[in-house]
Image (cartoon, rainbow, N blue to C red):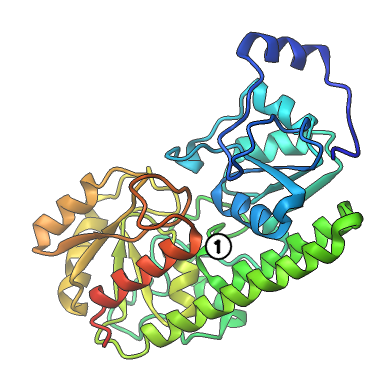
Amino acid sequence: MNVRRRHISAVALSAVAALGFGTLTACSSDSAAAGDTGTFDVVASFYPMAFLAERIGGEHVHVTSLTQPGQEPHDLEISARQTAQLEESDAALYLKGLQPSVDEAIGQSPIATKIDAAELTTLEEHGTEAGHGEEHGDEHGTEAGHDEEHGDEQAHEDEHGHDHEHEGGDPHIWLDPVKYAEVAEGVGKAFQKADPDHAADYRANTAALVKDLKALDAKFRTGLANRTADVFVTTHAAFGYLAERYGLTEEAISGLDPDTEPSGARVKELQKIAKEDGVTTVFYETLVSDRTAKTLAGDTGLRTDVLDPVEGITDHSRGEDYFQVMEANLTALRTALGAR
């Protein structure tokens, strides 16, 4: 489609010529480059955004992802070729606060339709742990459905010295099916406005996706209802929204940045938490080294398992798309938390 074809700058064209103008790895199997497909061209920052664009856009969109499968999204640096693709696309779908180089590139791009998922729902603060703070031993987590109170409850984390690497709130909103559905509805409206000729299809596709996300939420509520523990340990604090939604407590080895090394004091604290709260499992993820998780598990006599933040789908993922991997996450949590 590319209803707003733009002239690429001489600098960008030179960069493209040097690097080779090809397609980024995308959800779509279409091999054409963004801006040259005859459809509504959407550049997505990473997998959860690309998945939304694919499901909502259907046959009317061509989606390319700036983050390739297997690449850690937090580490992405935008290339000149990708900058040129942005200038040739109809829309950009991203999550501000997760990938600084993407935020900068899209901010400087002349692309008319810029969809920031962070503006389509409410971001909250999560640090090294969700709902725990220094008062370990008190009530863990928050009852599901009290999201509006979460910001106040978590404000004490800053007073206790926990760092929040992402100013403006935790960006991992897609791991809460309810928040992800809110984002989906916003994306659907943006597509309808940008490409009104296919608005009816975008509206219908959005409704179908939201229905599926509500069903996933119901599975988590039911699946985690009868459990013997509330606390789970992960390598980095990606699951704060999920924990808050279902009344759990996430204890992360690192903060929101998966590459942050934990302090010795934090490791000792986690060992104490594991003993006091009946933690059975240290979770790690597929796109980051499992070394720290296995070291902690070995020191505490715990097992390890995968809890996937669904930042990208690879051959090592426990499923072929967002829904399959999230259901695998539910299975892993049920086992770790003693759910019946």
Q: Is residue 121 visible?
A: no
- Which residue appears at 73% of the width and 55% of the height? 57
Residue 294 on image: x %, y %:
17, 52
The residue closer to the viewer here, 189 or 202, is: 202
Residue sitting at the far bottom: 226
Q: Residue at x 66, y 22 (%)?
A: 81
Q: Residue at x 46, y 71 (%)?
A: 242
Q: Quadrant of residue 181?
A: bottom right
Q: Considering depth in this image, is 18 or 270 the residue closer to the camera?
A: 18
Dividing the picture into quarters, in which one does residue 276 lie? bottom left
For the point 18% across and 69% down, which residue is it?
A: 272
Q: Give the class, few, some or many, for how many residues have Cα within 10 Å of label 1's Cα (few <14, many ≥20).
A: many
User: Residue 330: x and y, percent?
Assistant: 37, 72
Q: Amino acid at mark 1?
A: Trp
Quarter of the figure with the N terminus: top right
- Residue under label 1: 174
Compare residues 264 and 213 and report the one nearer the observer.
Answer: 213
